Amino acid sequence: MTSVYAAGDAGLGGPLDVSRAATAVLDADGTVVGWSPAAQRLLGHPPQEVLGQPVAALLVGGEDGGEDEAHESRPDGTGTAAGPPDTASVSRRVLRMRHRDGRVLRVATAMLPLSPAGTGPARLLVVADAEETEQWEALQAMLRGLATQSPVGLAIYDSGLRVVWTNAALHHEMGPSEYNGLGPDEMVTHGEVLSEGYPPTLEEMMRRVMATGEPVIDLQYRGRPPFDPERDHVWSCSYYWLRDAGGATLGVCEETMDVTDRYLAQQRLDLLVRAGGRVGTTLDMARTARELSEVTVPQFADEVTVDLLEDVLDGESPAPGIAPAGRLVRVRRPEGGPGAPLAPGERPRIAYPPDSPQTRCLASGRSVREDPSERPGGPPPRARLAVPLRAEGATLGVVTFAWDGRRDPFDAGELAVADELVARTAVSIDNARRYTREHSAALMLQHSLLPQSLPELTGVELAHRYLPADNTAGVGGDWFDVIALSGTRVGLVVGDVVGHGLRAAATMGRLRTSVRALARLDLAPDELLARLDDLVAQAANEGAVPVGGHTMPYDEALGVTCLYAVYDPVSGLCRMARAGHPAPAVVDPGAGSVTFPDLPAGPPLGLGGLPFETAELKLEEGSLLALFTDGLVQSRERDLGEQLDGLRSVLADHRRPLDELCDRTVRTLLPGSVDDDVALLLVRTGMLGSDQVAVWDLTADPEAVSFARAAATKKVGEWELGELSFTTELVVSELVTNALRHAPAGPIQLRLIRDRTLICEVSDTGHTSPHLRHARSDDEGGRGLFLVAQMTQQWGTRYTPTGKTIWAEQSLVPDWGGDEEF
């Protein structure tokens, strides 16, 4: 028996392993000459009943009978004999053998040659249960397929975390080198664990698996394998603890699969999703370009540069088709680049060489990739990708992605992602461009509707602030105005249109124009508001809309509040009326006390109700008036009483410059964002000196004309305005004569005012409106007012409770009109 093969020598294992299977030794004639205890346990025959008997006696149906399933293999499993000199094949068959109790057993058998014929026992018969053997062989086939055919890489690490076995997939994936004896982090370079919540290295992670016994599933690991040292790969790894039957640690099993393409696809998808939420959050082109850079660097590229056409930055619509490369303006330069970041409003112009990717991109309207290998001997490798910013068939600019140290160009997947990123960015930039255009138009409208500069008037010192609630458009419905009136008087207006934005601004402009036109008629404040109210009501009725089966008046001006005041620096009187508007604050110049006069509160415009009333205040020289809209003191978050107290505290220090007081008022009352339009107008009153005004009461006598001429001429001489004597004498003569003719009952008053102009006023009790006439050549009169109109800067009429006043103004520097003839 010493010549019997060991288990591995014959290529047998499992149930047919000779160390555990039933065995019988046969001579050359097939007679049983040896019977093992395992054979007795399997078939039930003791040795004495079998030895010396032919083995065929144990077979059911004879040696060749039954359901034979035979195959042959070489002892080493490869078809080449090994071991003894005899090179006969190992025969494997499935036979039926009879148990001692009469049962028929289906068994797997193997016949092994032992020695040449005639020299001793010739063969060894190995017998095992056929079903158990087939199950074991099936399992072995599966394990063999796992080791050789599985696409999942397998590696077994011992307790010291050194590789002791790898399957064919891992050999194929990692290259032909031998990895036995290496640690987990030694099989790649630049390796790092990507999954959150795990140690940074595989060795630390695998030690945790052995310490806790908890498996790790789908851990993502990035590194550079030897077969592709220039490119990162990503693997999905799983780990579990290996122990023997007694619980002792054998090591860790690793399952890996290269998921680089899947990982990149997921990362690019995540990038697009992230860009969708973070790019284009505002209607600002430079901010949008910065958001694109923040999203893509460093995951997708090392740096991003955004250049736009100058017309696009100005809000203009780009021409369809190809864009010229010479009109680019840099709006986003790479972080850390020369001069980065760009200062607000900075517009560096960019000129790219004709052969640059950017120029070729703009010329073709398509993305252009630059291959770093095409620049041998130049600077360090750098991959660049230029993508056009296009919206609605027009090019807005170009985006350049760059990757330092990269030797290959952007691949097709990266190109697709870049195109998608830039396409989304182009939509946001085009929206910002449209907004810029509309915003510019809105600001232009706003600037045209509000006073560009306040007039310089002797009787008042002025300052103002305007804060629209619609910060995105920069326009609102509140307004203020300062109107120069006759006789050095000043019209002060502040109003509040319901709502915000462009529509409210348009309504405000319409009302402001109406107020200025009515103010030129020198109407009293209450009469001006009454006429303005009629205009609003009329417009509302013309724009009536059906509501609930009824026709309701509609106009944006309905409900507008307004305050109109007229200040006279000659008398110091201020007459004002309001239509639902907050009363102004009045600061006494001596005591510094701040009051809010109790003015009659008329209804908002267009709503009807109580009539408007004019109140009259006597203001000392140096008094301070604060006219404002309710947005300054009223809101849902602020208490009205506290806001008014805050306004009092600021205005109490009234001697400060008005601009400083405006800023302090805004900072104190509106420390944060505003939710309503705010207009603030500060007015410090002045008075004309007694030496600037001359008044004469005239009788209703024709001789008064000559007296008036003489008095006016003398006064003009005292004012050292002798060059105006002739014109003044003529104007006074014509106006006094006109008063005597149309108001013979008297009294008549002549007043001269020396301010920035020379003003001549004649007041009478008549109410007849004067008008110019075009006298015929044979008419004896009718030329008086025509001459006055021709020889003065402007003239007009205002009505008073006792009659009317005709006035005319002359420039202190006469302009005789060149060749004009009179």
Image (tube, rainbow, N blue to C red):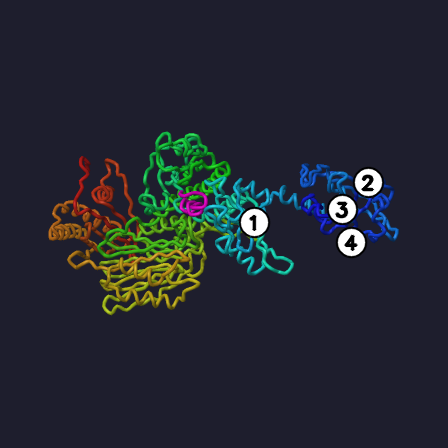
Cα gap from disc 3 to disc 1, whole angstroms: 33 Å
Cα gap from disc 3 to disc 4, whole angstroms: 12 Å
Magenta extent: 288-303
Q: Quadrant of residue 150?
A: top right
Cα gap from disc 2 to disc 3, whole angstroms: 17 Å
- Mark 2 or 1, nearer chain start: 2
Residue type at mark 4: give it: Pro
- Residue assigned mark 2: 29
Residue 630 colored in magenta in the image: no
Residues under numbered marks 2 and 1 in contact, where contact means CB atoms less than 8 Å apart: no
Cα gap from disc 4 to disc 2, whole angstroms: 23 Å
Q: Is residue 360 above or below residue 261?
A: above
Residue type at mark 3: give it: Val
Question: Which is nearer the eye, 160 or 620?
Answer: 160
How many C-alpha atoms fall within 10 Å of the one at disc 3: few (<14), some, or many (≥20)? many
Residue 293 colored in magenta in the image: yes
Q: Secondary structure at mark 3?
A: strand
Cα gap from disc 2 to disc 1, whole angstroms: 48 Å
- Residue assigned mark 3: 126
Q: Quadrant of residue 353?
A: top left
Nearer the observer, disc 2 or disc 3?
2
Residue 14 in percent (x, y) is at: 71, 49
How many C-alpha atoms fall within 10 Å of the one at disc 1: few (<14), some, or many (≥20)? some
